[in-house]
Image: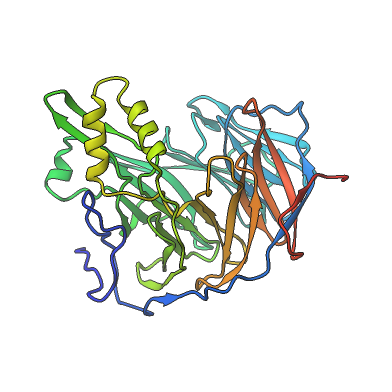
């Protein structure tokens, strides 16, 4: 079905390198609204549980919580199920290719009645486990083309439908040249993996430095590039943002844009020292410093992205990880209502990344000075201040 953007709708991330975001819309809904600039109460957090040092993780990729407060942790090729007090109850799956085995877990989600939904992009397979069981109830394969990878998938509501994210490979891809393969797209799937809606939301891919001169050809990543971020709420609403600003759009599962909001924000400028450091790092191998500097200057990017990531909690609140003011500053999580109103914020060390929030508890991944990971549970408070106390203090 042809994708027609709303004629009055603003684009996202219009830059010299990327076209405006194309979005599949059936009908234009609410006009853009600007969120109130006045801050709300500041959230505090008290640590109430943490995994012991004897619990080793190989690389945590996903966190969710079921109705009983048990924590589901995607860790490499298995799901580690923790009690509400962060002790290990059991493990689901193992490394491999067979039934109930995984190469890499991208998402893990607690379903109704505490079934467990797991998606492995390496195998392009969804596996669902019954409550309390380590034996799969069923699995679903997600089909894709030779150059298209379904890299993320989550359940989209009570009808068993799935929202999956597909990415087209970079480079000389024929489908891209013909204009029939989008860079990144969210699709709505049936429980069996067949497509319900092919273009739920179209998204621009991450900015890269594309170099093609006498020194060679290459595509380089640079740290202050913009990229798309999206999240799916438990109510079946897709939120999308382009990290250039705190501007977010919400879409229903029919592809209709429900609302859009913008939160005023002053981005952090890229200093000359930071620019010089990036040039030095990127010019170590194939390209000269002068070539890399010209490519960076050609992006016209003079600030860091407004935010790094976000997720939606069980109360339809957006938790947005703002880009820190400096390398050693705390990470501020701005809390927004579903229409963009400021509800508060929470400051955590950059070594702590929130995974999800359920009710008044937040679940995070903490990394120590040796990059050893642990799961931390926080009790959220409305007391002004951002001190994070450890359990027992």
Q: Is residue 233 left or right of residue 228?
A: right
* Residue at image coords 26%, 35%: 293
Figure coloring: rainbow
Quadrant where the image shows the N terminus: bottom left
Relative vertical location of residue 304 with respect to residue 161 in this rendering, above or below: above
- Residue lying furthest right in this view? 392
Relative vertical location of residue 345 with respect to residue 229 in this rendering, above or below: below
Q: Is residue 234 left or right of residue 383?
A: left
Q: Quadrant of residue 112?
A: bottom right
In percent of width and height, residue 123 lies at 42, 33
In percent of width and height, residue 327 lies at 53, 40
In percent of width and height, residue 195 lies at 33, 54
Q: Quadrant of residue 213?
A: top left
Q: Is residue 249 visible?
A: yes
Relative vertical location of residue 282 with respect to residue 61 in this rendering, above or below: above
In percent of width and height, residue 9 lies at 28, 73
* Residue at image coords 33%, 28%: 282
Q: Is residue 170 visible?
A: no
Figure label count? 0
- Residue lying furthest front in this view? 272
- Residue lying furthest bottom in this view? 30
* Residue at image coords 69%, 39%: 375
16 vs 88, nearest the viewer? 16
């Amino acid at each position: 079905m042809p994708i027609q953007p709303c004629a009055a709708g603003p684009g996202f991330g219009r830059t010299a390198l990327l076209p405006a975001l194309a979005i599949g819309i059936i009908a234009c809904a609410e006009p853009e609204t600007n969120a109130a600039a006045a801050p709300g109460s500041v959230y505090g957090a008290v640590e109430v549980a943490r995994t012991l040092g004897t619990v080793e993780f190989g690389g945590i990729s996903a966190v969710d919580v079921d109705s009983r407060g048990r924590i589901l942790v995607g860790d490499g090729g298995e799901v580690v199920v923790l009690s509400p007090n962060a002790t290990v109850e059991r493990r689901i799956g193992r490394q491999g290719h067979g039934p109930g085995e995984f190469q890499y877990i991208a998402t893990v989600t607690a379903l109704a009645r505490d079934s467990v939904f797991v998606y492995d992009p390496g195998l392009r397979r969804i596996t669902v486990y019954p409550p309390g069981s380590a034996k799969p109830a069923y699995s679903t394969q997600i089909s894709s083309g030779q150059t298209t990878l379904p890299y993320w998938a989550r359940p989209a509501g009570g009808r068993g439908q799935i929202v999956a994210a597909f990415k087209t490979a970079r480079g000389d891809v024929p489908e891209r040249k013909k204009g029939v393969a989008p860079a990144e797209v969210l699709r709505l799937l049936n429980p069996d993996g067949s497509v319900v809606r092919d273009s739920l939301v179209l998204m621009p891919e991450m900015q890269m430095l594309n170099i093609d001169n006498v020194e060679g050809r290459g595509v380089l990543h640079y740290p202050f590039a913009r990229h798309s971020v999206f999240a799916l709420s438990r109510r079946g609403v897709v939120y999308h943002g382009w990290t250039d600003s705190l501007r977010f759009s919400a879409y229903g599962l029919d592809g209709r844009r429900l609302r859009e909001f913008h939160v005023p924000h002053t981005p952090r400028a890229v200093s000359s020292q930071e620019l010089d450091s990036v040039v030095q790092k990127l010019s170590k191998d194939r390209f000269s410093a002068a070539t890399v500097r010209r490519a960076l200057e050609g992006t016209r990017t003079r600030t860091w992205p407004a935010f790094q990531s976000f997720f939606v909690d069980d109360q339809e609140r957006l938790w947005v990880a703002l880009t820190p003011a400096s390398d050693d500053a705390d990470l501020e999580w701005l809390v927004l209502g579903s229409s963009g109103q400021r509800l508060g914020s929470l400051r955590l060390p950059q070594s702590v990344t929130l995974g999800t929030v359920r009710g008044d508890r937040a679940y995070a991944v903490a990394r120590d000075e040796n990059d050893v990971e642990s799961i931390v549970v926080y009790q959220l408070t409305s007391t002004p201040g951002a001190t994070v106390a450890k359990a027992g203090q």
